[in-house]
Amino acid sequence: MLVRMSEKMNVGLTFCFAGSVSASEARREGRTGSILSYVVFAQEKPTEKDRGMRQLSSGSYDRLAHNHTRLEPLVFFLSGIPGLEHAHRWISIPFCSVFVISLLGNCSLLYVIKTDPSLHKPMFFFLSMLSSIDLVLSLTTMPKTLGIFWFKAGEIGLVGCLVQMFFLHSFSIMESAVLLAMAFDRYVAICHPLRYHSILTHSLVAKAGLVALMRAVVLMLPLPFLLRRLSYCHSFTIAHCYCEHMALVRLACSNTRFNNLYGIFVALLIVGLDLGSILLSYAKILRAVLSLATKEEQHKAFNTCLSHVCAILVFYVPVVLSSVIHRFGHHVPAYIHILLANFYLLFPPMMNPIIYGVQTKQIRERALHLFHRQQLLRKATL
C-alpha cells in the first residue's frame, strides 16, 4: 500500500511539473492549482497515461519543457485584480453599485423609448442600440467579476473563456460603430435638416445596426480560432477579471506573432475608421454651427450634440488612456492596468443613461411622466 501511495504521489508531482503549477505555488496564489494536478490526484487507479508518465526520466521532462510540449488547458483561473486580492471584498462594493446602476439605467432607457411612440425616431433607435450593447457588456463580464471578488470563483473553462472574449470584443466594436452612426445622425440633423427624414429612414437605421453587428462578428470570429491553436504550457492563471485577447496571448508559449499583428490591425481599423469619421463629422458640424446667424441658434445646435459628445468622450477616453499607459507605463503596477480595463467596461454603461436622461428633454419628460404615473397608481391601490 505504501508503494502504491508513493506511485500516486509521484504521478501527481509529475503532472504538477508538466503544468508548471506546483501545489505550494497554488496555495501561495490562493487557488487550487492546475486542472491537470487535481484531476490526477482524484484518480483511484493509475491509467495507462499515468504509467507512461512514471517511466519518463527527469531529463525527458527537461526536453518536454524545452520543446514547449502542448498541454490543453481544461480550466483557466481568473485572478481578479493582481496585487489587491486582500481588498477584493471592498472593491466589489463600487463594482456592484455601478453594475446595478447600469442595469437599472439602461433597462429604464429602453422601456421609455419602447413605450413612447414620440421617441420612435432615428436618434432614439440608435440610443436603444447603445443601451442594449451596454447591457450585454455588463452582463458578459460583471457576474463573473463579482463571483471572483465574493467567492474566489475564478475558474473558467477554455470554451467559456473564448466565448466571453468574443462577446466582449465584438460588442465593444459594435458600440464604436453605433457612436459613429449617431455622429452621422447629428451631422444630417444640423447640416441637412430639411432632408433629415428622407435620409435617415427606419430602413437605413436597421441596415446601420445590421452592418455594425456583421462587422463586429467578421472581425472577431477569427480570434477564438487563433487562440485555440496556441499552446499554453507556462501557466493557466489569467491576471485579469475577465478573458480578453492579449491576456490569453501572454499565457501562450508558441508563436503569437499573427495574434499580435491581427490585434493591432483590428484596433487601428476601429480607431482609425470610426474615430476618424466621427471627428470629420463634427468638424463639418462645427463649421455649419459657426455659420449660423444668431448666438441662440448656435447654442441650440450645440445643445443637440452635447449628449453625443459626452458619450464619445466616455467611451474613447478610457480606451486611449488605457492604451497609452499600457504602451508607455512600464513601471505602473499591474493592478492599475486591470482597474483601467474595468473602468473602460463599467463607466460607459453607467454614464450613457445618465447623460441622455439628463440632457435629452424628451427622455427626461417621459421618464418623469412614467414615474408620476406609477406613484399615482401605487396610491390608488392603497
Image (cartoon, rainbow, N blue to C red):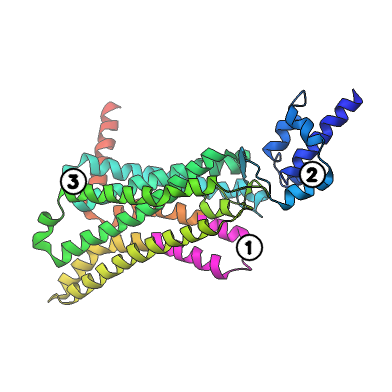
Q: How dense is the environment of label 2, judged by Cα within 10 Å: few (below 14), some, or many (20 and up)?
A: few
Q: In this view of the protein, which residue sits in the foreground, 67 or 186?
A: 67
Residue that lies at the very extreme toward the right in this rendered image:
2
Q: Name the residue under label 2.
A: 24
Looking at this view, is 298 or 243 the one in front?
A: 243
370 with respect to 275 (left or right): left
Question: From the viewer's perspective, is residue 137 above or below residue 193?
Answer: above
- For marks 3 and 2, give the one nearer the viewer: 2
Residue at horizontal 59 percent and vertical 42 percent from the top:
148
Q: Quadrant of residue 184?
A: bottom left
Q: Which mark is first along the chain, 1 or 2?
A: 2
- Magenta stretch, main secondary structure class: helix
Q: Is residue 246 visible?
A: yes
Residue 317 among magenta residues: yes
Which disc is residue 333 wearing? Answer: 1
Q: Is 347 left, or right, of 242 in this rendering?
A: left
Which residue is at a point 58% across and 48% down the rendered structure image? Answer: 230
Which one is in front, 316 or 354?
Answer: 316
Between the C-alphas of marks 1 and 3, the distance is 47 Å
Q: Does any portion of residue 365 appear in the rendered image? A: no
